[in-house]
Structures are given as structure tokens and as C-alpha cells.
Image: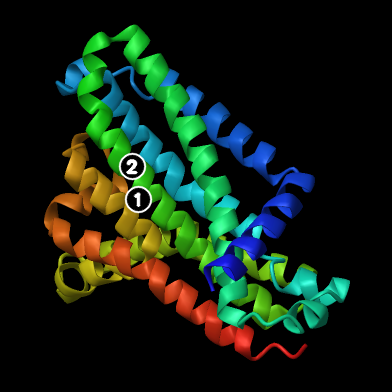
């Protein structure tokens, strides 16, 4: 089983390298991380936190948008592309289970994502420490951001595989992926904020709103990192709700969502006809 998963992962990694996904992901993370490291850490003295911890708060806001987008762009044609190229029937003739195929793709794409995250966050950490030696106190927050970003990426990789299986055409899967990214990462928070304003401190604000945040993997990721790093002072909007939600609840959501997404992907892939 492990050998079959590794073989699929190696093949997928070669495809990603040829498609320049490794280079694109690394460049995106490094460029945006350096920009936020230079701009977002300016108020660190006023907040009473070290430069790297404040940079991590800024990187959290970056990651909640960029990591899901990169993951969806890598995964939207994972199944649909195989169908269009006619390679899926050949792949399924081998003695490999469908879930093993998805596991191999997930392993390869997650490895690419980890490389990009380490490059981007590492560059931001170097800049912070060079400018403020006391910034080494923020390494714990940076490590926490790295592994939670990996789980967030794995979640959206699984979602991308599910969309790719349901669409069965790369163009359709791309449209679904972008629409889902806009819905979950951008419009979801705007809708919640509008509902909170309309509710004016009623039942929705006190009961439904916290659960709605935890139900979104992107919001759960942001809330966990802001609460754990005690950087809510640097947050705004929905990020300011981090103090009202228990740390274990957001952590549970962050840990469970990758499994749920991969489960959805497996069920959707089973319905794809070779």
C-alpha cells in the first residue's frame, strides 16, 4: 500500500514540477511574506510584542487567502485532468485503490505546499530576526502557523479533488474551485458580518455566529492562530472574535477538516467512471 501511494506521489510531483507549480507556489509565498514582513511588523513596538510575533499575525491574514487558493489551483484538475487526457482508465487498471491514488496526489501536493510555506515564512523570519534579535521569541508562533497552514492547505486540496471528481472536466473544475474560494474565503465573512450587524447582538450573534466561524476551515485556522498567539490586538473584523471562542474548539476544527475534505474527495472519486 505504501509503495503504491509513494509511486503515485512521485508521479504527481513530476507533473507538478513540469507545470511549474513548485516555482509558482514558492514565489507567491516568498514575495507576499516579504512584503508583509516589511510592512506588517511596523507597529510591533506599540503592541508590546516582538517583531516576529506581529509578523506572524500578518502572515495569518495572508495565509487564510493565499494557501487555499494555491491548494485549489494545484488540485482542481487532479481527477478531471486525468479524465480529459484519457489516463484515468489506464491508471485504474493497475492494482491500486482509488483512495490510494488520492492519497498519493495529496502527499505530493502537500509536500509542494510545505516547501512553499517554509520558503515564505522562513524568509519573513530571517528579515524579522535580522532587524530585531529579540524576534526569536516568536519562533513558536511561526511553527504553529506553519503546521496549521499545512492542514489548511490539505483541507482545500481535498476539496479540490472532490470538485475535480464532480466536474470531470478541467474547465468546469477550475470554475468551481474559484467560485468556492470566493465563497468560503471572501464572501462568507462578509455575509457573517452583515448578519451580525443586522442581528444587533441577538441570538445569531451569540449562538450561531461562533459556530458559523468554526464551520469554515479558513476562519477556524485564523481564529486558532490569533487566539494561540494572543495577537487579537493586531486583528480586525471577524478576527477580533478570536477571544470569544475557546482555543480547543478552533483547534478541533483545524484538525478535523482535512479528514472531512479527504473523505468527501474519496466518495466523489468513487463515482467517477473510468
- Pointer 2: what residue? 145
Residue 108 location in percent, x, y? 59, 55
Q: Is residue 28 left or right of residue 248?
A: right
Residue 92 location in percent, x, y? 73, 82
Residue 222 location in percent, x, y? 32, 50
| Mark 2, other Cα within 10 Å: few <14 / some 14–19 / many ≥20 | many
- The answer to which image quadrant residue 23 occupies is top right
- Quadrant for the C terminus in the image: bottom right
In the figure, 96 relative to 197: above or below? Answer: below
| Mark 1, other Cα within 10 Å: few <14 / some 14–19 / many ≥20 | many
3D distance between C-alphas at marks 1 and 2: 5 Å
In the figure, 177 relative to 53: above or below? Answer: below
- The answer to which image quadrant residue 192 occupies is bottom left
Query: Disc number at residue 148?
Result: 1
In the figure, 56 relative to 61: above or below? Answer: above
- Label 1 with label 2: CB-CB less than 8 Å: yes
164 vs 191, nearest the viewer: 164
Is residue 179 in view? no
> Which structural element holds mark 2?
helix
171 vs 160, nearest the viewer: 160
- What residue is at 62 percent from the left and 60 percent from the top? 9
Is residue 33 in view? yes
Residue 125 location in percent, x, y? 38, 23
- The answer to which image quadrant residue 197 occupies is bottom left
Amino acid at each position: 500500500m505504501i509503495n503504491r501511494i509513494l509511486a503515485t506521489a512521485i508521479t504527481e510531483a513530476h507533473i507538478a514540477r513540469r507545470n511549474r507549480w513548485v516555482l509558482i507556489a514558492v514565489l507567491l509565498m516568498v514575495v507576499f511574506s516579504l512584503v508583509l514582513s516589511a510592512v506588517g511588523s511596523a507597529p510591533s513596538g506599540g503592541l508590546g510584542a516582538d517583531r516576529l510575533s506581529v509578523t506572524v499575525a500578518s502572515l495569518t491574514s495572508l495565509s487564510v487567502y493565499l494557501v487555499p487558493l494555491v491548494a485549489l489551483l494545484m488540485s482542481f484538475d487532479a481527477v478531471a485532468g486525468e479524465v480529459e487526457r484519457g489516463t484515468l482508465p489506464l491508471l485504474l487498471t493497475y492494482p491500486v485503490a482509488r483512495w490510494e491514488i488520492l492519497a498519493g496526489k495529496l502527499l505530493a501536493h502537500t509536500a509542494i505546499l510545505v516547501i512553499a510555506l517554509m520558503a515564505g515564512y522562513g524568509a519573513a523570519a530571517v528579515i524579522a530576526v535580522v532587524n530585531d534579535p529579540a524576534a526569536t521569541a516568536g519562533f513558536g508562533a511561526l511553527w504553529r502557523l506553519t503546521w496549521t497552514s499545512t492542514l489548511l492547505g490539505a483541507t482545500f486540496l481535498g476539496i479540490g479533488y472532490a470538485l475535480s471528481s464532480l466536474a470531470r472536466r478541467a474547465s468546469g473544475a477550475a470554475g468551481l474551485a474559484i467560485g468556492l474560494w470566493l465563497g468560503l474565503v471572501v464572501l462568507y465573512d462578509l455575509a457573517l458580518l452583515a448578519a451580525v450587524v443586522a442581528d444587533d447582538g441577538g441570538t445569531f450573534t451569540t449562538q450561531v455566529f461562533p459556530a458559523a466561524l468554526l464551520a469554515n476551515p479558513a476562519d477556524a485556522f485564523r481564529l486558532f492562530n490569533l487566539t494561540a498567539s494572543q495577537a487579537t490586538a493586531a486583528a480586525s473584523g471577524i478576527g477580533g472574535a478570536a477571544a470569544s471562542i475557546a482555543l480547543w474548539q478552533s483547534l478541533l476544527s483545524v484538525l478535523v477538516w482535512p479528514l472531512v475534505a479527504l473523505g468527501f474527495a474519496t466518495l466523489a472519486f468513487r463515482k467517477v467512471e473510468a
